[in-house]
Image (cartoon, rainbow, N blue to C red):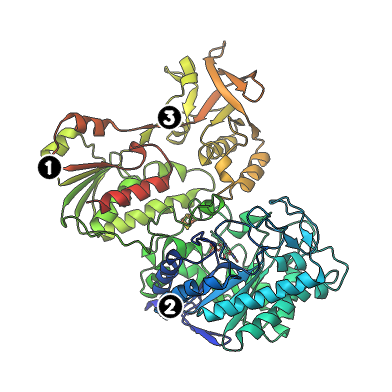
Amino acid sequence: MSATSRYQYLFSPLRIGPLTVRNRVVFSAHLTNYAADGLPTEQHAAYYAARAAGGAGLIITEEHSTHPTDWPYEKLIHGFNPAVIPGYRRITDAVHAHGTPILAQINHNGGQASSMFSRQPVWAPSPVPDPLFREVPKALEPHEIREVVAGYGQVAEHCAAGGFDGIELQCSHSSIVRGFLSPATNRRTDEYGGSLANRARLLLEIVDAVRAAIGPELALGVRICGDELIEGGTTIEDAVAIATMVEASGKVDYINTSIGVATATLYMIEASMQVPPGYAMFIPSAIRAAVNLPVVGVGRFKDPLQADRALAAGQADLIGIVRGQIADADFVAKARAGHATEIRTCLSCNQECVGRMGLNRWLGCIENPRTGREAVPLPAPRRRGQRVFVVGGGPGGLQAAVSAAQRGHHVTLFERSDRLGGQVQLAASVPSRAEFLDIVRNLIAHAQRVGVDVKLSTDVDADLLLAEKPDAVILATGAAPNPPWWAGAAGSGPDHRVVDVRDVLEGRAAPSGKVVVIDELGFHQATSVAELLADRGCQVEVITNGMVVGQDLGVTLDMEQWNVKAAARGVTQATDLVPMGAAPAENGAGVVLNLQHHPTGTDQTREVDWVVCAVHQRAEDGLYRALRAAGALPFTLQRVGDCLSPRRAHAAVVEGQRAAVAL
Ligand SMILES: Cc1cc2nc3c(=O)[nH]c(=O)nc-3n(C[C@H](O)[C@H](O)[C@H](O)COP(=O)(O)O)c2cc1C
Ligand code: SF4
C-alpha cells in the first residue's frame, strides 16, 4: 500500500479560498523568539523553509503585532513597522521555493500584555486586569478602536507586500479580539459590549479592513477559541456562533481553532503529555457541523495516522501539527514516503519549545539539536570514516552515536546495562510520563538505521579502549546518586532510610508509611516519585528549599496537573525549608529530619519512615579520569552530558551532537 493511499485523507489537496494546499497538515502559528529588534531574521526563514521542504501543506507564522501598544514580550515581530517587509520577503521566498503557501498571523494581544517593553498602557475592551500580567488596561475609546482596526489593515498590507499568501487573525487565546469576544473581559455597555453580536463587532470590522487591504487574491483565516476554560469565558456554543458570523461575512476562507486563554489556561493550549492526544477536537467538530468553511483542528497530534483518522472521522478539514514538526521538520515527507516510523515523535515534554519561550530564549527542541539552528550549516567532518567508540547509551551517547554515524564514521556504542536509555528509562517509568521514553525510542531506531553497532551489557574500561585504539572516544557515562551532606548516618548502612529517587525507581528501596520527598531539583524527579509513592499507599509530603515545589513545571505547563494530582492523592507540600540534618529515629525504624525555614531562620522537624531525595547527582567520570591518568592517548577523547556535569536531557543531546560534529 502506498503512503498516500494509507493516509487517504491527509494527502488529499484542499482549496482554501484562493489557495490550494497539497496536503492537510498545517504548521500552525507559534512563537519562536527568533526576531531581533522587532524584525524577522534569517533564523525564521531557515526554520520555516525546513518545514516547507519537509512537506507541510500550509505554514502559518507566529504572530506579528499590529500596533505599538502591543509588546508583551521582547522578541515580538513588529508588523506595524514597514521595515519588516524585507524580512517577510526572505521568509516567503525561502518557503515558496518548496511550493508551500505561507500565511502571516497578525495580532494585538490587548490586555494580555504589560507596558514593560512599550512603556504605554495596554489596550483592552475594559479595565479588567489580566491574571498573568496583573496590569489594569486602558479601556479603548472609539477613536482608539478605529486605530486598532486600521492597524490590522496596515499590517496586512505589509504582509501582502512581503509576499505572504494570506493572513490569519489570532482571535483565540491571547488577543484584543478575544478580549472583546469574551464576557469575562468585555464589560462595555456601548455597541462593542453586551450581546455576542456586539462583542464580535471588532472582529468583523477587522475582517473587513484586512480583506480590503489584501484583496481577493490572498487567503484570510480567523483563529477562534473553542472554550476559554475560565469562569464566565466564551464556550463552545459561543465559538460556533462566532464562526457562523465570520462565515456570513463572506470575507473569510477558513477557521482555525484553539482552546484556553494564554495567560490563564495555557496548559491546555500547548498541553503536555499529561493531556490525551487530540484533546481539543470537540471544537473543530462542533464548528464544522455549523459552517462550510474549512476548519483546522489542533492539539497533540503525534503521528500521521492519528491525523488521518481525525480527518476521516470528519472532525476537521486540516490538522495543525506544531510541536510534531518542531521536533521533526520532515514529519510530512516521512509520512508521505511511507516511513512514518522514522518520524522523531514529539514527546509533548514542552522543555525546549514552550519552556524556552517562557524564559525569553529562542525556540528549540529537546531531541532535535537542529531546531532553531537551520540557518547555521554544520562543518564537514575533519576526517571521514573514523572508528568511533561511544561509551554510555543514554540520550547523550545515543545522539553522539547517531550524529557520528550520519557523518560517515564507523560507530560502536557500548552500554553497561542490558538496555539503552539511561535515566530516561526511569523518568518515563512513573505515572503520566511514559511518552518521555519516545526520545530513546526515536534515537534507538535512528541508530539502527544509520548502522550503529550497539553492544549491551558491556563494561568498558581504560585498558579496553587503550588496547582497541579507536580513532575517537566519546564518553557519555552519566551520573550517579550523590547522598546529600545532611543525610549523615540515616543515609548509609544496611537499613538506611534516606534514599535517592533512583533507589526507589530502580527498585533498591521500597518506602512505605510516612515519606518526605526532598525537592532540590525543581523538576519532575520529586513530583513524579511523590505521585508514585502516594499511589502505592504512602502518606507523602514534598519539601523544597524553593518558593514552590517542582518550580520548573511552571515553564513546561505541568504545574496545574501536578497540583491537581497531588491534592487528589493527599500529597502535602512545604516550601522554603532547607534540610539541616537527618538521624535514625529512636525506635530504629525511621528518620528524624531537621529543617530550617530559611526566610525566618526557625527550625522544624519531621519524624517519618523514609526520606526520598531528589537532589543533585555526581558525574560518573571515573573512566575519563582513568584515561587522563594514562597519559598520551591514541585517540581523541570527549565527554558529553551528565558525566561532564549532570543536567537535563537536552544538554546531553546537544553535546552528543556537538562531539560528533567535532570529529
Ligand atoms: C512554543 C509555542 C508557541 C505558540 N505560540 C502561538 C502563537 O503565537 N499563536 C497561536 O495562535 N498559537 C500559538 N501556539 C499554539 C499552537 O498553534 C498550537 O495550537 C499548540 O501548540 C497545540 O498544537 P501541537 O500539540 O501540535 O503543538 C504556540 C504553541 C507553541 C508550542
Ligand atoms: S521540546 Fe518536547 S514538546 Fe517541544 S517539540 Fe521537542 S519533543 Fe516536542
Q: Which amino acid type is marked by label 3?
A: Arg
Q: Which amino acid type is marked by label 2?
A: Asp
Cα distance between the residues tagged 3 and 1: 37 Å
Residue occupying the point 41% across, 71% down? 49
Q: In which quarter of the image is residue 647?
A: top left
Camera-side mark, 3 or 1: 1
Which is nearer the N-term, disc 3 or disc 2?
A: 2
- The local secondary structure at tag 3 comes to loop
Which is nearer the N-term, disc 3 or disc 1?
A: 1
Which mark identifies residue 383?
Answer: none
Cα distance between the residues tagged 3 and 2: 58 Å
Q: Quadrant of residue 553?
A: top right
**Residue 464 percent coordinates (x, y):** 15, 37
Q: Which amino acid type is marked by label 1?
A: Lys
Give the residue number, with chain letter if any, for mark 2: 93
Give the residue number, with chain letter if any, for mark 3: 508
Which is nearer the N-term, disc 2 or disc 1?
A: 2
Residue occupying the point 21% across, 30% down? 626
**Residue 6 percent coordinates (x, y):** 42, 76
Label 1 Cα neighbours within 10 Å, binned few <14 / some 14-19 / many ≥20: some
Residue occupying the point 69% across, 51% down? 133
- Count the marks: 3
- The local secondary structure at tag 2 comes to helix
**Residue 53 percent coordinates (x, y):** 39, 73
Whether residue 471 sits left or right of residue 443 in the image: it is left
Asked if labels 2 and 3 touch by Cβ distance under 8 angstroms, the answer is: no
Whether residue 232 sits left or right of residue 117 in the image: it is right
**Residue 113 percent coordinates (x, y):** 67, 57
Cα distance between the residues tagged 2 and 1: 49 Å
Asked whether the viewer can see residue 445, the reply is: yes
Give the residue number, with chain letter if any, for mark 1: 469
Q: Name the one closer to the observer, 248 or 130.
A: 130
